[in-house]
Each structure stands twice: as structure tokens, then as C-alpha cells.
Amino acid sequence: MSTVAGVCRYGFDGDGKAGVKSMLHAPEAVAFDANHTMYISDTMNHRVRRIDPTTGLISTVAGNGDSGYEDKNMGGCGAARFVSKEAAGQLKHGDGLLAVEAVVNSPVGLVLDKQRMLYVCERGENKIRRVKL
């Protein structure tokens, strides 16, 4: 057995470094495309990450790191703040935006289709999102 992504600490320490030296926070799923690129649901970082099979470098393909809730919790008091931010136009859910600018709240499951569309199960918002790769 060997590690292909992540270190013993959890968090987010950016993109553009080796996947085996990068922090993740509660990764829950992986998917691969035809080129052997690995996609990771970095759940508590509210991102979908990619590891290039040639370079081994990690990058974000979806999610801006924001859950959409000011207190970073799902529901409860955070839900009221979410609604307030949304009403004030301060929240960018992401539909129609670049995927890396979108709010992606707790992505868990991932599936790729043959047209290079990545489907993301967004647990925190009870949605299935689609990203063109």
C-alpha cells in the first residue's frame, strides 16, 4: 500500500504542489478519467481536486472553499446566515460561473461520463452538480 494523495494533517494548503504532500480534509471519493487523472472529493475543504497523472501535481477543479455558511456548519444558525447572504446577493452558488468560483458545499460522490462531464454529489446542498472538464 502507498499514499497517492494527502498527508497526516487535515486542511487546505493550496494547489500546484505534489498530491502526496498536499493537505486534504475528509476526502470521500475518487474518480478517474480515460487519461488516468484522479479527481478527489475534498469534502470539508468544499472543493473537488485533481491530480495530474504525469506531474503528480494537485489542483482545484470545482469549489472556492466556501460552504456558503458563515459559521462553516451545515444548517442550524448557519442556515439563517446563508439565506441572508443569498438575499443580499453576497453568495455565488456557482450555476453559470466558472467551477472554481462556485460554492460547492461538502462534495462527496464523483462520477465522470464519456463526454468529460464530472457529476458531483453535493451533500451540503442536496444537489447533483455537473462540471465540464
Image: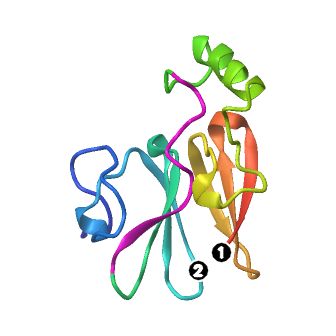
> How far is disc 1 from disc 2 in space, using C-alphas?
10 Å
Characterize the local packing of mark 1: few (<14), some (14-19) or many (20 or more) Cα atoms within 10 angstroms. Answer: few
User: Going from the N terminus, do you reach mark 1 or mark 2 first?
Assistant: 2
Residue drawn at the location 66% of the way across and 56% of the way down: 120
- Residue type for callout 1: Leu
Give the SS element for disc 2. Answer: loop
Q: Position of residue 133 (x, y in %)?
A: 65, 74
Tell me, for residue 33, which label it has, or none. 2
Front residue (pair 114, 19): 19
Tag 1 near tag 2, CB within 8 Å = yes
**Does residue 101 appear to the left or right of 26 in the view shown?**
right
Region in magenta: 56-70
Characterize the local packing of mark 2: few (<14), some (14-19) or many (20 or more) Cα atoms within 10 angstroms. Answer: some
Q: Is residue 59 magenta?
A: yes
Q: Position of residue 8 (x, y in %)?
A: 21, 49
Q: Is residue 34 magenta?
A: no
Q: Is residue 36 visible?
A: yes
Which residue is disc 1 drawn over? 133
Q: Is residue 3 visible?
A: no
Picture quadrant where residue 52 is located: bottom left
Front residue (pair 69, 129): 69
Location of residue 122 with respect to 99 vertically, above or below: above
**Does residue 22 appear to the left or right of 114 in the view shown?**
left
Q: Position of residue 35 (x, y in %)?
A: 54, 88
Tell me the chief SS of the magenta region. loop
Tell me, for residue 51, which label it has, or none. none
Q: Position of residue 108 (x, y in %)?
A: 57, 48
Residue drawn at the location 38% of the way across and 69% of the way down: 58
Location of residue 16 with respect to 29 vertically, above or below: below
Picture quadrant where residue 122 is located: top right
Location of residue 99 with respect to 65 vertically, above or below: below
